[in-house]
Image (tube, rainbow, N blue to C red):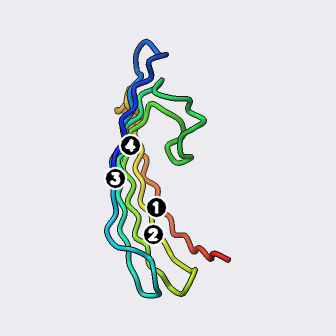
Amino acid sequence: TGDLVFNTAAPNHNRGAWIGGHVGALTKPGDWQWAYAYRWMEQDYQLDLMVDEFSAGTDVQGHRLDLNYMLAEKTRVTATALTRQRITEPELGMLTILYLTLRQDF
């Protein structure tokens, strides 16, 4: 899947893109799923309060990779790796975030 945004209200730095997909499904215990997404969000492509918290606003680009495993019915564990880098100041370097989530739905 993908999405391309062009903010006509902003004079420049007004484009954004998202592309991603997944392989697998979490329907029963023992199932696996891989998910990947790439985001590229210029400074004024949208309000930065509307983006995901790991992007920390706009003027960023980065990757997200999730590995999901269904432990039991309505219980899954997810290992996530994220990268984030400023578009206008790439010399500041890339931020990498790794975390593990255990989710139980009721």
> Any mark on residue 98, and which?
1
Label 2's element? strand
Residue drawn at x 39%, y 26% as measured from the top left: 6
Query: Which marked residue is nearer to the observer: mark 4 or mark 3?
Result: 3
Residue 88 occupies quadrant:
top left
Q: CA distance from mark 1 to mark 4?
A: 17 Å
Query: Which marked residue is nearer to the observer: mark 1 or mark 2?
Result: 2
Q: Which residue is mark 3?
A: 20
Q: Which residue is mark 4?
A: 39
Residue 84 occupies quadrant:
top left
Question: Hey, what amino acid is under mark 4?
Answer: Arg
Badge 3: how crowded within 10 Å, few (<14), some, or many (20+)?
Answer: some
Residue drawn at x 55%, y 85% as measured from the top left: 73
Q: CA distance from mark 2 to mark 3?
A: 17 Å
Mark 1–mark 4 contact, CB under 8 Å?
no
The picture places residue 17, in percent across and down from the top left corner, at 36, 37
> Any mark on residue 79, and which?
2
In this view, the residue in front, 64 or 75, is 75
The picture places residue 23, in percent across and down from the top left corner, at 31, 68
Question: Hey, what amino acid is under mark 1?
Answer: Leu
Q: CA distance from mark 3 to mark 1?
A: 19 Å
Residue drawn at x 50%, y 64% as measured from the top left: 99
